[in-house]
Image: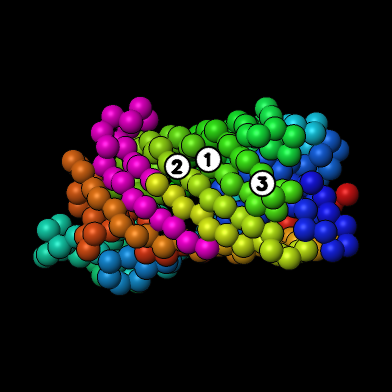
Amino acid sequence: MAFAGGSFGAPAFAGEGIFGWLYSLDLQPRGKAEVEQRVDMTHRQAVGRYDWNQYRTEIEYGLSDDFQIGAYLNAFSIRAQDNYLSDEVCATTPCTAGFGVPGTASSGGAYRRSGIDGASLEAIWRISNPVTSPVGVGLYVEPTWGKLEDSLEFRLLLQSNFLDDRLVLAANALVEMEREKYDPANGIIRNSMADLLYGASYRFAPRWSAGFEGRLHTDHDGYRFEQHTQTANFIGPNVHYSAERWWLTAAWRHQVGGSCYGGGTADCSLGHVWDSHGRDQIMLKVGYLLN
């Protein structure tokens, strides 16, 4: 729902991203296009240094008012040093933990890598609109092809708006199959995950919103959820600003705890899950309406 002047209705224009990691049902209208830049930073593990940054440039286009497509160009950078796994694995031999860091980097020296990773496609179908229905429902699919990993992601999108659309509650139920291939010495790693993403955003001033979002993450061996290996919880704040033709969102989530099971027990220490996760994750997003 658009606003003008001092009105507090949300959002400033259709398609703006008020959350960091959650997808909402505010889509591009038919014939409208937007370019969006994301920087997703994962920081800090048990010890040492680990910085895993993803850079995604997307163009979104509304095929209809309820069906949006998009295409991403993905890039990355990694900086790691001595980011060991749990003591029982690395008591005598240093080993790295973070996603994107191969086993050949386990000598304890610094590891750096950056470059273009690959591309993703995206499609979102809005089945019901939260502006006109008590609960908005949508379906999302995203295949990714990359140097480090191939993946296929599905989401069920849920959203409800309250207080003349100033308050937005949203949730995404996510499943993803991953084919990690960044470590040739260890071969292909096949994973699957199921997540629940949830959050709220409140427009407290004509161009400003703020709220929180969380993630309940589970990881599994194999493409078909064969063995449960990890559970982790993340939560943190978000803030959003919208101008006439552009918007900016910043979000942070902190890992508040996690557990590992079966073959994944080496990925946990100090009550947290490491592997492809960190203590903190920061998202910066900016969007610009092209027409």
Q: At which x and y percent is residue 45?
A: 33, 65
Q: Which residue is mark 1?
A: 172
Vertical relation: 174 (above or below) 271: above
Answer yes or no: is residue 39 visible.
no
The crowding category of the residue bearing disc 2, from other C-alpha atoms within 10 Å (few below 14, some 14 to 19, many at least 20), is: some
Question: What's under tag 1, amino acid-wise?
Answer: Asn
Q: Which residue is mark 3?
A: 162
The crowding category of the residue bearing disc 3, from other C-alpha atoms within 10 Å (few below 14, some 14 to 19, many at least 20), is: few
Earlier along the polypeptide chain: callout 1 or callout 3?
3
SS at badge 3: strand
Q: At which x and y percent is residue 78?
A: 45, 63
Vertical relation: 272 (above or below) 146: below
Q: At which x and y percent is residue 164?
A: 74, 48
Which stretch did the figure color magenta? 217-237
SS at badge 1: strand
The crowding category of the residue bearing disc 1, from other C-alpha atoms within 10 Å (few below 14, some 14 to 19, many at least 20), is: many
Q: CA distance from mark 1 to mark 3?
A: 18 Å
Chief SS of the magenta region: strand
Numbered badge on residue 196:
2
Residue 229 falls inside the magenta stretch: yes
Please name the residue shown 37% across and 30% down the image.
223
In the image, 247 versus 225, the foreground residue is: 247
> Tags 1 and 3 in contact by the CB under 8 Å rule?
no
SS at badge 2: strand
> Tags 1 and 2 in contact by the CB under 8 Å rule?
yes
Q: Would residue 139 be found to the left or right of residue 86 on screen?
A: right
Answer yes or no: is residue 190 visible.
yes
Vertical relation: 5 (above or below) 152: below
Image quadrant in which you'd find residue 125: top right
Q: Would residue 257 be found to the left or right of residue 18 on screen?
A: left
Earlier along the polypeptide chain: callout 1 or callout 2?
1
